[in-house]
Image (tube, grey):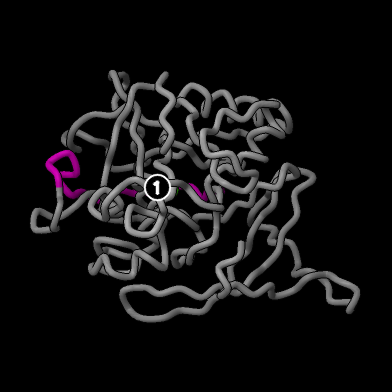
Amino acid sequence: MSDGRTEVETSGSAQGVEPPARDASVPTPDGWTQETRRIGTATPDGEVWKEVAYYRHPCGMEFVAVPAGGFIMGAPRDEPGMRRSESPQHEVRITRTFLLGACEVTQEQYAAVTGQNPSRFTAPRGPVDSVSWDDAAAFCARLSEMDGATYRLPTEAEWEYACRAGSTTVYCFGDDPEPLVDYAWYSRNSGSRPHEVGSKLPNAWGLYDMHGNVWEWCQDWYVDGYRSRAPVDPTGPASSTYRAVRGGSWFDYPTPLRSAGRGKDQPFNHVDDHGFRVVCELRP
Ligand SMILES: [Ca+2]
């Protein structure tokens, strides 16, 4: 991660500094390591500097522990660009802390697990693109076989909860799209291509590229609107034609990048601005 405002808090390096004590409340699988970093970002309440623990999978993917909690999912009626598919706003509770990829899965990580790289925009540290939902699900299944933990795509509720990181505004940093240039790769600054993951500012929970770079496949089947949706750990409809994607991409104008913004695609489609990030479930 090279956003220029991230400092490694402790390195365990030759100076004799020990890494921070492993957080026993986050029981990661064997072989993982943990590092605490100081990140700088902005929230609707102002600039924030804070320490975030990053948990590293042996294949190099880094995760953040997203705490159990509640939030308001969806967009208010008066949000500019709001679409009916993002309504009604409703309270959601996430009852279990989970690990979420700090970044989109990169091409080198994808290749390390699958032996393949389907991306159109080849770059080892770039997000894997042109992966279908089926590919992404297979990647998670493969990871699960490797160490016995459960890996999967985030639900839409988990994704939006993590994207907002406590905010209730249009974007994780506020309502004005102007600062998006500091947080996201999108039509204004991307040069019509994705970029190295983690090279913009993170949100308040230390997650990168939730807005922009590549759309991210979610676990849920897609349905327009949130009527009759469960308020606790919602997982979407039992079946549909489409899977949900979130966050917008290098191709998009700001509107699809909104925290509440939703997209959809057929699960077998390979699209050059679609990628994904991964959840690792924590054992109770
Ligand atoms: Ca993204």
Q: Nearer the viewer, residue 51 or 128?
A: 128
Q: Quadrant of residue 258?
A: bottom left
**Magenta residue span:** 83-100
Magenta span has 87?
yes
Secondary structure of the residue carrying tag 1 is: loop
Q: Is residue 284 visible?
A: no
Q: Is residue 36 left or right of residue 239?
A: right
**Image location (x, y in percent) of residue 279:** 53, 41
In the displayed orientation, state which residue is furthest to the front.
191
**Image location (x, y in percent) of residue 44:** 31, 74
Q: Is residue 234 left or right of residue 227?
A: right
Q: Which residue is mark 1?
A: 192
Q: Nearer the viewer, residue 125 or 84?
A: 125
Q: Is residue 135 left or right of residue 226?
A: right
Q: Amino acid at mark 1?
A: Ser
**Image location (x, y in percent) of residue 5:** 56, 75
Quadrant containing the C terminus is top right
Magenta span has 94?
yes
